[in-house]
Amino acid sequence: MPEINLLDCYPHSRRPIVARGKVKLAGRGRLSVPPSDFATTEDLLMQHALLRTARRFGREYFDGDRLYGYGGYHYHPKYWTATARRLHEYYQLPTGASVLDVGCAKGFLLYDLKRQYSDLTVAGVDISSYACSHGHPEVRSCLRVADAVALPYPDRSFDLVVSINTVSNPPLEDCKRAIREIMRVSRRHAFITVHAWRTEQQRANLLKWNLTALTYMHVDAWKELFRELGYQGDYYWSFVE
């Protein structure tokens, strides 16, 4: 169960962390629950109405304003091409191997895998019907609307199961279920990334930037959770820096 960054080829753009944090702290009327005298800054950051919109994973999250999510989630080969190659080479996927992306969004990683390795069988699931219906046309038929806590596949269906920043979106118990589901449907390899921090600055940035994760914790706490679940796959962290 190694900690390994298999997304080290993925380009990262500058994030307007401070701007989003200010919006999330903008005041009364913008919160999803009424503020109280006992509300902490973290409470306000995590209960803003902005998060309710983002967590619907609809058009606003993928193709709306940047404050709600991606600010336009479109395919560009610079994002997933090298990462697809990295995954294929690291796991030494054989001819005819099968790959599942849990939380596949519009299927761009799957498209770049299939484009470079046409022998692969690829599949993706996402909770967003919007993302699946607006998926890359070359892999749209491979995408299914489904929840990570109940994957619609038999045991040991895939040679590799990948999940990027998805299993940490639901509350803790459902996060555990999602990891168990990944373990169940994988017959060989699994790689997940989760929302985490090592430093207090990373934690502060995550609270300002995060729109979707309901389970987020220090890397050591995540490692303890993996041990509790008996997760034997690979993992890395989604830091906000």
Image (tube, rainbow, N blue to C red):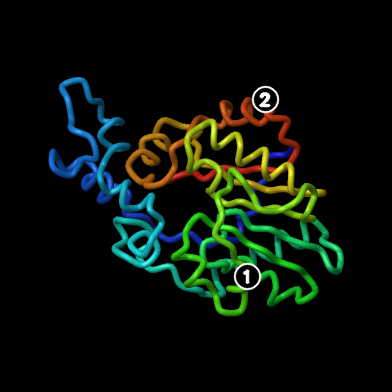
* Left or right of 38, for residue 71: right
The residue identified by callout 2 is 228
Q: Residue pushed farthest top? A: 38
What residue is rendered at 48% in x and 40% in y? 170
Against 103, residue 201 (above or below) is above
Q: Which disc, if any, is residue 1?
A: none
Q: Is residue 142 above or below residue 186?
A: below
Q: Secondary structure under badge 2?
A: helix
Q: With 98 as the anchor, is 198 left or right in this view?
A: left
Name which residue type carries label 2.
Answer: Glu
Work out whether residue 238 or residue 8 is closer to the camera in this orientation and state it.
Answer: 238
Q: Are marks 1 and 2 in contact (CB under 8 Å)?
A: no
Query: Residue 14, position in %: x, y?
Result: 39, 58
Residue at horizontal 72%, vertical 48%?
Answer: 190
* Left or right: 89 in relation to 142: right
Task: Report the residue that reaches farthest toward the right.
Answer: 94
Disc 2 crowd rating (10 Å Cα; few below 14, some 14-19, many 20+) is: few
Q: Residue at x 51, y 66 (%)?
A: 132
* Name of the residue lying farthest toward the left: 28
What amino acid is at disc 1?
Answer: Thr
Q: Quadrant of residue 204?
A: top left
Q: Give the residue number, with chain letter if any, for mark 1.
A: 81
Whole-percent x, y for residue 151 in the image: 64, 50
Instruction: Please count the marks in the image.
Output: 2
Residue located at (56% from left, 79% from top): 137
Dot 1 lies on which element?
helix
When the figure is inspected, residue 204 is found, relative to residue 51, above or below; the finding is above
Of badges 1 and 2, the one in the foreground is 2
